[in-house]
Image (cartoon, helix red, strand yellow):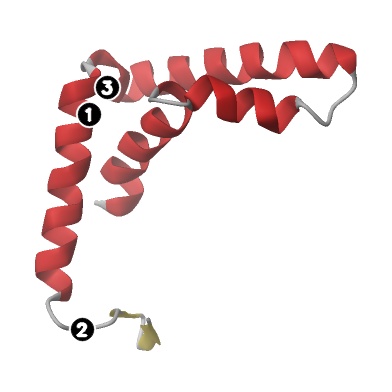
Amino acid sequence: MLEEHFHQCFEHQLFFGTGGRGRLLEFASSMSAPGRWLVPVVLRRAFSKQLQARGMGRHTEDVIVTQGRSDLDVLSTLLGDKSGFVVDGEANP
């Protein structure tokens, strides 16, 4: 769920949600002039195409946020009072 679904909700909010454009501009601000202008445009286009292809980009922002919150609610229920999960026999707090 986290890898296949929530990741897309998170990615959408990171790059297209509130402050997404600013985060990309900040990321590119340390680059030279051509990169500073091109990288945000190229990254937004690439992430948009990928999210469209995987289906998440076809929803409204409200639906994406609701789905992401639902994923986190399920994770919270699974965790209960535990501090982490056991994956492949190793504790992951």
Which residue appears farthest toward the right when viewing the image? 32
Q: Nearer the viewer, residue 67 or 23?
A: 23
- Which quadrant would residue 67 be assigned to in this image? top left
Q: Residue 82: which numbered mark, if any?
A: 2
Residue ID for mark 1 = 64
Q: Nearer the viewer, residue 73 or 3?
A: 73
Q: Amino acid at mark 3?
A: Gly
Q: Give coordinates of residue 78: x percent, y percent.
A: 13, 70
The numbered mark, 3 or 2, whose residue comes first in the sequence reads 3
Q: CA distance from mark 1 to mark 2?
A: 27 Å
Q: Give coordinates of residue 74: x percent, y percent.
A: 12, 58
Q: Residues within 10 Å of mark 3 (few under 14, many from 20)?
A: few
Q: Residue 75: which numbered mark, if any?
A: none
The numbered mark, 3 or 1, whose residue comes first in the sequence reads 3
Residue placed at 28% from the left, 25% from the top? 56
The numbered mark, 1 or 2, whose residue comes first in the sequence reads 1
Q: CA distance from mark 3 to mark 1?
A: 11 Å
Q: Is residue 88 above or below residue 48?
A: below
Residue placed at 39% from the left, 25% from the top? 18
Q: Give coordinates of residue 23: x percent, y percent.
A: 58, 30
Q: Is residue 73 left or right of residue 10?
A: left
SS for callout 2: loop
- Which quadrant would residue 51 be assigned to in this image? top left
Residue ID for mark 3 = 55
Q: Quadrant of the C terminus?
A: bottom left
- Which quadrant would residue 62 be assigned to in this image? top left
Residue placed at 22% from the left, 33% from the top? 65
Q: CA distance from mark 3 to mark 2?
A: 33 Å
Q: Amino acid at mark 1?
A: Ile
SS for callout 3: loop
